[in-house]
Amino acid sequence: MSLDKQFEQAQVDVRTLTKRPSDMQLLDLYAFFKQATEGDNKTSKPGMFDIKGKFKWETWKAKAGMSKSEAQQKYIDLVNELLATLK
């Protein structure tokens, strides 16, 4: 199965989790997904009152320079790890 197909399947599979991942795992899922689909974060940083947005922005920004295929693979690996522990 191609990496793109595995990435698409991971997006479907992550929705089958029965337990909630940790906040850091959720942030990593978000950041790997954004890096894989949009590339480096070029958006403006959220304001200081948007705490959730700030954490999401910073986690995605930390992935800067990561290739699309590397981000896809890390997303897939994280989803598989979550499926093994939280399903």
Image (cartoon, rainbow, N blue to C red):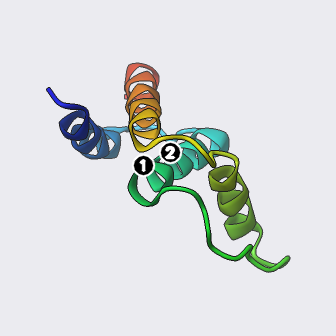
Of the residues tagged 2 and 1, which is closer to the observer?
1
Q: Is residue 44 above or below residue 25?
A: below
Query: Which labelled disc corresponds to residue 32?
Result: 2
Residue type at the position of mark 2: Phe
Instruction: Give left or right: position of 24 versus 71.
Output: right
Residue type at the position of mark 1: Ala
Mark 1 and mark 2 in contact (Cβ < 8 Å)? Answer: yes
Residue neighbourhood size for the residue with mark 2, other residues' Cα within 10 Å, grouped as few (<14), some (14–19), many (≥20):
many
Where in the figure is residue 8, as x and y percent of width and height? 23, 44
Q: Quadrant of residue 14?
A: top left
Mark 1 lies on a secondary structure that is helix
Instruction: Give left or right: position of 53 versus 39.
Output: right
Disc 2/disc 1 C-alpha distance (Å): 6 Å
Where in the figure is residue 30, as x and y percent of width and height? 52, 52
Instruction: Give left or right: position of 24 versus 21.
Output: right
Where in the figure is residue 85, as x and y percent of width and height? 46, 21
Foreground residue among 80 and 39 = 39
Q: Is residue 74 above or below residue 58?
A: above
Q: What residue is at 39 percent from the left and 56 percent from the top? A: 37
Q: Which residue is mark 1?
A: 36
Q: What residue is at 62 percent from the left and 68 percent from the top? A: 42
Q: Is residue 23 above or below residue 73?
A: below
Q: What residue is at 47 percent from the left and 31 percent from the top? A: 74
